Structure formats: structure tokens, C-alpha cells
Amino acid sequence: MLKALWNKTLVKRVFYVFVIIVVWEIIFNMEVFSPLLFPSPFTVLSTFVREIGDGSLLLKAGSSLLMIFLGLFISVAIVIVLMTLVMISKTIRDLSSTLISVLDPLPGVALLPIAILWFGVGSEAILFVMVHSILWPILLSVITGFDSVPLIFREVGMGMGLSKMRMMTGVYIPSAFPNILAGLKTGWSRAWRSLIAAEMVFGAVGKIAGLGWDIYYKRSYLDMPGMFASLIMIMIIGILMEDYFFKRVEKATLVKWGMVI
């Protein structure tokens, strides 16, 4: 019974979080670091609960998530257009591969000065940096996935007389879905990194500041419990997306189709 309970992901996560809190509290009591810079975990948790209760942290998280989903939507839309063109033209495919090789290694933070000059200090500049960070790994994953589609699948599709669009939706996308999902996961993680970095530089670009600016603002006033509370919120959102979104999508697609065990 205990073994079956331990095999549950939620139980493992709760246990590991408990261990981290215990170690954190021990280090705090040993006064290895100044209490001003390294607050007690219980102080952090109480601050987190208070900011959740008054809604301030939820509003900031919502503002950041809105920007992330907008960046993901724009990036996916561009990928769909590019992949449609790639299926039609070898020149577009070669151009896309070259752009990936040149731009994918370029950190989004490095484009912040260009974003400021082109778009000013606002949400457009943040979206520009985010789309750059998200677009190329997703595009690379989709192209890699399409290239890995077994030849027999392509031959069957062509033998059935499927059009290029039907080949994409009925053969390429289902076969390449593991790569596509991996690209979306990478894009999601890069979106967070780009957003937090951009918000720390640009500050509050809307009526409600995002988590990046919140962390930077609290750091300026040495509100360490509040800063850790914002970091915890980012971690919780990441865990929820991984455990309750991507895994559900994986079970509804890859597991159901027999692509993974």
C-alpha cells in the first residue's frame, strides 16, 4: 500500500517539498546567512498565503501568463504558416533551417536593446523578445518531427492520393506529435525565462505588473519574503503546466496512440 502511495507523483512532490522546507529552516536557524537576505520558510509561506489571499500575487501571475500565452499563440501561428510553406517549397525549407541555425542560439536577452529601439519600452518589445525565444525551438522540433516520419507512412498517404494539406494533418502531424509536444514544452520554458528577464528590464508595461517586475521591485526594497513568494508562484505554475496540462495532452494523444508506454 505504501509502495503504491509512493508511486503517485503528488505524494513524491509533497514529500520532497517538506524535506526542502526542513533543510531551509535548519540553515535559517544556523544563521549561515543574514535573516534579512535569507528569511525563514514559514515567513515566506505566510507572505505567499497573504498575497494569494489579497489577490495581488494572482493578478501579477495572470498578467505574466497572459503575455506568455499571447507569445505562444503568435509563435505557433508563425510556425503553422512556415511549415505550410516548407511543405510546398524546398527554398523555404532551406531558408527556415538557416534561420534556425543562426537565430536559435541567440539569447532573447541579447535582443533587448534592439527591441527597445524598434518598439520602445512596452508590451510590444516584450512580445518581440518572447516570440524570438519561443519560435525557433518549436520550429526546429516540428521540422525534425516531420523528417522522422517513417517513409512507409508517406508512401501510404501518397498512394491514397492525399493532398499536401491532408498529408500534413493526417500523416505528418500525428507522426511528429512527440517532437511537436517536446517543442511546445521547450517554448513554454523559454517563454518564462524571456518574460521574467524582459519584465525586469522594462518594468510594468500595463496596468498590472507581471511577476518579473514584482521580483525586481521587491528586491529593490529588500522584501525577501515577498520575492521568494513570487518565485514560488512561478514554480507552482510550472509544476501545474507540466503535471496537469502537458501530461494530460500526452495521455490523450501519445499514450492513447501507443507512441509511449
Image (cartoon, rainbow, N blue to C red):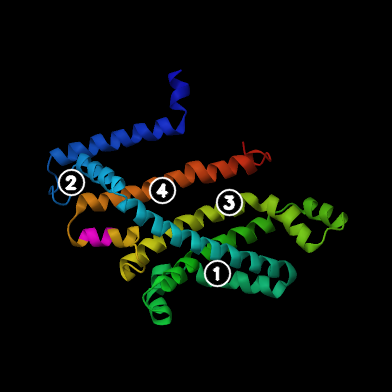
Q: Earlier in the sequence, mark 4 or mark 1?
A: 1
Residue 85 as seen in the image, left or right of residue 10: right
Residue 258 as seen in the image, left or right of residue 247: right
State the separation of the CA atoms marked 2 and 3: 38 Å
Mark 4 vs mark 1: in front: 4
Q: Earlier in the sequence, mark 3 or mark 1?
A: 1
Q: Earlier in the sequence, mark 2 or mark 3?
A: 2
Callout 4 amino acid: Ile
**Element assignment for label 4:** helix
Q: Quadrant of residue 80?
A: bottom right
The residue labelled by disc 4 is: 237
Q: Dot 2: few (<14), some (14–19), or many (≥20) neighbours within 10 Å?
A: many
Q: Which residues are magenta?
A: 215-219
**Which residue is at a point 48% across and 56% down the rendered structure image?**
188
**Element assignment for label 3:** helix
The residue labelled by disc 3 is: 181
Callout 2 amino acid: Pro
Q: Which mark is residue 101?
A: 1
Q: Earlier in the sequence, mark 3 or mark 4?
A: 3
